[in-house]
Image: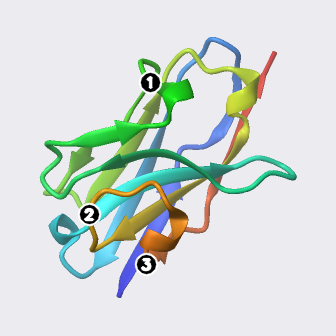
């Protein structure tokens, strides 16, 4: 069992930056692929980014490439989502997720989820 707790959401103006954190507890953090998803109001949950166990491989949603990064610190059992050049369309609840499978963009591939943190980008 893995428990995930997100933090760092908030309100930011367009063009600004925000950094989300996801702290994991429970089983060995480094054994899990970690990912961020988001869900806007009235929309389906959408893949944002994922990172491999060692951090050597990551993938991103096309619309966030070059603006978002997903570093992880296995010593701190934490994965981050650094978001720059934010746009109003980035507004959503952001969820952290963990999987023992390979890096994947499908929500069903992830076994554990955090409670989510709200990110609001004003124009």
> Which element carries disc 3, helix, strand or loop?
loop
How far is disc 2 from disc 3 in space, using C-alphas?
12 Å
- Residue 84 at x, y percent in the picture: 50, 20
**Who's the residue at 61% across and 43% down the image?**
9
- Residue 78 at x, y percent in the picture: 30, 55
**Who's the residue at 36% across and 49% down the image?**
50
- Left or right of 25? Residue 54 is left
Check whether the beta carbons of the residues at disc 2 and disc 3 lie within 8 A of each other.
Answer: no
Please identify the quarter of the rendering in which residue 88 is found. Answer: top right
Quadrant placement of the N terminus: bottom left
Please identify the quarter of the rendering in which residue 31 is found. Answer: bottom left
> Which element carries disc 2, helix, strand or loop?
loop
To which residue does mark 1 refer? 65
- In this rendering, is residue 87 above or below 19? above
- Left or right of 117? Residue 11 is right
To which residue does mark 2 refer? 102
Check whether the beta carbons of the residues at disc 3 and disc 1 lie within 8 A of each other.
Answer: no
**Who's the residue at 37% across and 44% down the image?**
80
- In this rendering, is residue 48 above or below 62? below
Q: Residue furthest right?
A: 42
Chain-order first, disc 3 or disc 1: 1
To which residue does mark 3 refer? 111
Q: Residue furthest top?
A: 15
């Amino acid at each position: 069992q893995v428990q995930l707790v997100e933090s760092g959401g908030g309100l930011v103006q367009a063009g600004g930056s925000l950094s989300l954190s996801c702290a994991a507890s429970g089983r060995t953090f480094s054994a899990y692929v970690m990912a961020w998803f988001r869900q806007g109001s009235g929309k389906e949950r959408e893949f944002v980014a994922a990172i491999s166990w060692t951090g050597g491989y990551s993938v991103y949603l096309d619309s966030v490439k070059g603006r978002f990064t997903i570093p992880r610190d296995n010593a701190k059992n934490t994965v981050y989502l650094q978001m720059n050049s934010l746009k109003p369309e980035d507004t959503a609840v952001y969820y952290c997720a963990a999987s023992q499978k390979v890096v994947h963009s499908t929500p069903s591939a992830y076994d554990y989820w955090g409670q989510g943190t709200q990110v609001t980008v004003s124009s």
